[in-house]
Image: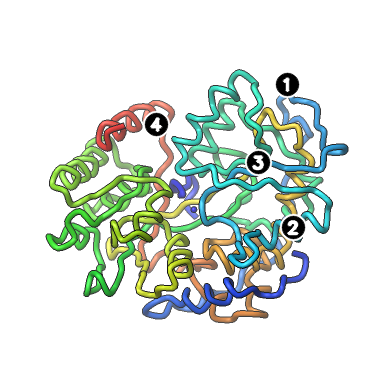
Amino acid sequence: MSRRQPPQDPVVRQLISLNRSMLTRRNLLKLGGGAAAAAGLAACAPPLPPISPTGGVPSLQLPQDMSATQKTINFANWTAYMDYDETTKKYPTLEAFTKKTGIKVNYTEDVDDNDTYFNKVAPQLRAHQDINRDIFCFTDWMANRVIREQMAQPLDPWAMPNVIGHLLPSLQQVSFDPGRKYSVPWQGGFGGICYHKKKVGRELKTIEDLWAPDLKGKITVLSEFRDTAGLIMQSQGVDIGGNWGKPELQRAFDEVSKRISDGNIRRVQGNAYMEALKAGNAFAGIVWSGDIFILRAETEDDNWEFVIPESGGTLWTDNLMVPITSTHRANAMKLMDYYYDPKVAAELAAWVNYISPVVGAQEELAKTDKELASSPFIFPTEDYLKKHKIQGFRALTAEEEAEYGAMWAKVIGN
């Protein structure tokens, strides 16, 4: 949960008995308009190519791994990206992992957006100072930077048999991490628009609908430009996965500037936008798909609607990585592999409602909830992506990232 930015490459054991909050969530997550059933997932993915434990980077200085004696993991993730039991105030799948392995997971929702979290931890990682995290989660484009700057430890695929056997074929080979030596996909999702049906009083179908006079000051948009500007670019007729340049991006940035100046946009935020929607300070905006389903459950209000704009939506994938300073690499890989058990992946998917990267998760989810297992927000088909014009934001060069990031910071006042 883009959380995230679009990718560079376009597209527990047994289920724990369902707790009250999950049942409520499933009832509330029925999609308005009825989505077409997703087709069965591809057959078991072929093995990932073997790599050495050092990932082919002999000069990389890794800290001593204390996993054998220290049964712990510190896991930093995005908000609303893990199954949660409101009654016990615990995370069921993480609790099951600890029971199975004896490894305690200290789970924190540290990540609000990619840039903010990266800028927080990067100085320490560059200096090889411990950030007290063993797993963190970044979107493809930022994962690329983390890998490029040697801030992540190489992974051992042979320590993760579930990942080898169940990673979706379409996610196995990516340009930012050939062979998946440093990253394991966590979840994916869409950038689109949301609104409160009762408060708005009509359907919102386009980006332009957000700028209606009666919604002035009630719109929130994402602080990551690949989603906010990406959706606006699509509404302006730009193929965001194609050969566009600075003028096209500038036009989208100018639109955001205008809407901020005119008062249409209340705030430009990362994951904190959820709180603005809960509080009623905003009731429409540019958002990430799964968050709105969480919002329905937490507010017990099924008036919240998520839609892909008529002009198209964005597509992204988030990835788990081990920071270069972690001393619990083996424990971290056990946790990553655990979430590639299709039964565990199904339970997670039923709660977060983001795109599962795990082959077999759809079949497992269908055993308990056939309707949810047919949701294109969890298991999208190629036909669904094409019909709704859902695209990944094209890869940027390092020079473009720096230039466009600086331009965006001026737009949003950072």
**Separation of residues labelled 4 and 3 (CA atoms):** 24 Å
- Mark 4 against mark 2, which lies toward the viewer? 4
Q: Residue at x 65, y 44 (%)?
A: 75
Amino acid type of the residue that numbered disc 1 sits on in the rendered structure: Gln
- Mark 1 against mark 3, which lies toward the viewer? 3
| Badge number at residue 401 | 4
Near mark 2 (Cα within 10 A), the count class, few <14, some 14-19 or many ≥20, is some
Q: Which residue in the protein does label 1 denote?
A: 61
**Separation of residues labelled 1 and 4 (CA atoms):** 28 Å
- Asked whether disc 1 touches disc 2, contact meaning CB atoms under 8 Å apart, the reply is no
Q: Earlier in the sequence, mark 1 or mark 3?
A: 1
Asked whether the viewer can see residue 363, the reply is no
Q: Which residue in the protein does label 3 denote?
A: 135
Asked whether the viewer can see residue 272, the reply is yes
The image position of residue 122, as x and y in percent, is 54, 27
Q: Earlier in the sequence, mark 1 or mark 4?
A: 1
Q: Is residue 28 above or below residue 87?
A: below
Amino acid type of the residue that numbered disc 3 sits on in the rendered structure: Ile
Q: Secondary structure at mark 4?
A: helix
**Separation of residues labelled 1 and 2 (CA atoms):** 30 Å
| Badge number at residue 192 | none
Q: Nearer the viewer, residue 108 or 173?
A: 108
The image position of residue 142, as x and y in percent, is 50, 37
The image position of residue 348, as x and y in percent, is 62, 63
Q: Which residue in the protein does label 2 denote?
A: 165
Q: Earlier in the sequence, mark 4 or mark 2?
A: 2
**Separation of residues labelled 3 and 2 (CA atoms):** 21 Å
